[in-house]
Amino acid sequence: MSADSSQSLLPDLLVEIRSVSFGYENNLVLRNIDLTVRRGQVVAILGPSGCGKTTLLRLIGGQLKPSRGEVMVDGLAVPQLDRDDLFQLRRKMGMLFQFGALFTDLSVFENVAFQMREHTDLPEEMITDLVLMKLHAVGLRGAHELMPAELSGGMARRVALARAIALDPMLILYDEPFAGLDPISLGVVSKLIRTLNDALGTTSVIVTHDVATSLDIVDYVYLISDGRVVAHGRVEEIRASSDPFVQQFIKGEADGPVAFHYPTGDYASMIFPGHGD
Amino acid sequence: MTVPYTLETGSAPCLSLHGDWTLDNYSWLLAAAQPLPGSIDSLDARGMTAMDTAGATVLLNLLGTEQLGRLASDAIGLSDERKALLIAVGKSVATQKSGPTSPPRQFGDSLARLGAYVVKGSAEILQFLSFLGLALATLFRLLPRPDRWRFTALIAQMHQTGLNAVPIVMLLNFLVGAVVAFLGATVLREFGATIYTVDLVAYAFMRELGVLLAAILLAGRTASAFTAQLGSMKINEELDALKVQSLNPMELLVLPRMLALLLVLPLLAWLAAMAGMAGGAVVAVATLDVSLARFIGIVQEIPLRHLLLGLSKAPFFAVVIALIGCLEGFKVGGSAQSLGEHTTSSVVQSIFAVILLDAIAALYFMEMGW
C-alpha cells in the first residue's frame, strides 16, 4: 500500500486537469485548477463543503464542461468529445454516488448486472458468474437476492461499489463514499476502495471531507478551498505541511484561515449605526 | 424605593434617578415614566445603581434626545461609561432607520405579476416543446434498432397505466353517462323529445366525454405517478447513476412511459365511451321507457366517424400527459418538498393541457364540418 511503488511503475497520467475554471464570470466555482492523477493511484480531493469538489468530479465524468482550461482523461479531451465518444469513455469509468444511488426497483443482483446486460452481449450464465464475483469481492454474494430497501447504508454502498466495478473500469470516481457510515462500515468501505483499486489495477479519485479515513488509504492528496487548489502532495507531505489552512483542515479547528464568522462589518457599528462617526 | 426617579420642582428643576435602570425593571420603568411638565436644569444620578441600554432608552424617551445630550455631560454622579452608553443609545435612536417596509401596493403590481407569469409560462412551453423534440428524436433514432426496444418496461408501464386504470375509468364514465342521461331526460321532457336523450349521451361520449374523462383521469393518476417515480430517482441520484453508466434516461425511462400511454389511452377512451353509453342505457331503460334494443338501434345509426373523431384525440393527450409527467419529474430539485410541488404542478399542467387541446380540437372539427 505504499505510494511510491505504484508511482514509479506506471508514470503516465490518467487524468489531467490543466488551468480549469468553471462557473459564471463573476461567480466562479473553480478557479484555475491544476490536478493530475497517475494510473494506479488512489487520489483524494479534500475540501470543505461547497468548495467545488463534486463539480470537479462531474468535469472528469463529462457531465459538465469547464468554462476554461483542459480536462484530459486517458489522453482524450473530455469537453470536446461528441456524445458517442463520451458514452464510450464513460463505460471505462465507474462512479460511486454519495448514497449509493442503487436502482430501487431492481434487486442487488440486477443492479450489478444492469450495465453488463446493457453494454455487452455476454450469455446469461457468464453474467451470473461475473455478478456473483463482483458481489463476492465486496463481501455481499449472500445478499444478491435482496432489494436495495432491505440493505443497511454500508451494504448499499458496497453494492454500489460492486456496480461501479461491474465493467472493470480503468477509473473509479467516488463522491463522498464515507458520508453517513457507522465506524465499522466506514472501515469496510475504505479498505475495499484501497484493495479493489490494487487488485483490479484501476485508478481511483475520491472526493470527500473525511480527512482521517481518506488519509489512511490514499496515495496523493489535493486540498481544495474556495475553488482553488491550496495544497497537494503525498500523504506524509500533507501531514507534515506547515500551511495554516492544511493544519486547520486536518485537525478540524473551528477558526483559522477558514474563518468561524461569516464575513461582516464591525460588531459595534452593526449594533449602533453611526457609532464612531 | 418605589419610583425610578423624583423631580424637584423649583427655580432649577432637578431630576434624581434611583434604583436599577435595567432590562429586568423595564416594565416598572415604563409604567413610572410620565411625561415631564417642563424642561429640566440638572440630572442627579447618584441614586442610580445600574443602567443598561433598556434603561438608557427609557431615560432617552423621558428627556428627549436634545435635552439628554445637554444634561448628560454635567450630570451629578454619572460615570463616564454610563455617559458613553447614553450617548451611544441616543445616537443609535437618532439614526435608527425604520425596518424594511414593503412598498405600498400599486395597480401596476398585479400587471407586473401577470407579466412574470406570462414570461414563466412561455419559458415552460418552450421547455416542453424542447422535451417533446428530444423525445421524438430519441424515438426515431431507436426505431431502426429493435434490439434496443424495451418491451419489458413498455409492458410493465402498460399494465400499470392501462390495465390497472380500467375499473376506475369505466366506473367514472358509467356514472357520468347516467348523469348526462338524467339531465337530458329532464330538459328534453319539456319538448316531448325524451328519445333524443339517447343521441345526447351517445354523441357526447363518442366525440368528447369518453376520451376527455379518460385523459383527465390518466392525468391525475399517471402524470403524478410519472413525476413521483422520476423525481424520487432524481433525488436518489439514480438518474445520475444511469448517465454515468452511459445509459440514456430518455430512452430508458421516458420513451417506455410515453409509448405505453400512447397505446393505452385510445383503448381506455374506447372503454370509457362504452361505459358512458352503458350508464346512459341504464337510465334510459329504467326511466324513459326506451327498450335496450331501441337504445342500441339508435346508437348504431350514429355514423362511426364520431367515435373515430373522439378517439383521434387520444394519442395527442397521451403524449402530452406522459411528457409533462416525465419533464416535471426531471425538474425535481434535491428535496422532498420539491417532489411534492412538481407532482402537483404536473397534474395541474397536464389537465390544463388536455382541456386546452380538446377545446382546440372541438373548434377544428366544427370548422371542418366533421
Image: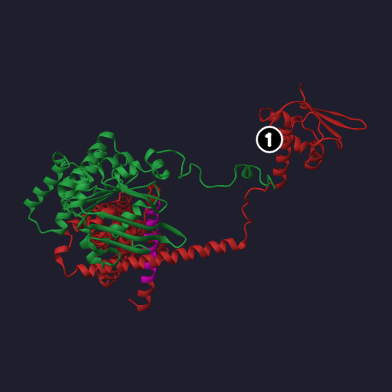
Q: Can the viewer see residue B214 in this picture? A: no
Residue B185: x %, y % from top left: 37, 60
Residue B358 is covered by the magenta coloring: yes
Q: Quadrant of residue B70?
A: top right
Q: Which residue is mark 1?
A: B53
What residue is shown at x 35% (from left), y 78% (from top)?
Answer: B368
For the record, the magenta segment spans B341-361
What residue is shown at x 32% (from left), y 76% (from top)?
Answer: B370
Letter of the chain in green: A
Q: Main secondary structure of the magenta part?
A: helix
Colour of chain B as rendered = red
In the image shown, does B57 or B333 lie closer to the viewer? Answer: B57
Instruction: Characterize the local packing of mark 1: few (<14), some (14-19) or many (20 or more) Cα atoms within 10 angstroms.
Output: some
In the image shown, does B288 or B130 lie closer to the viewer? Answer: B130
Residue at the extreme right: B11
- Which amino acid is tagged 1? Thr
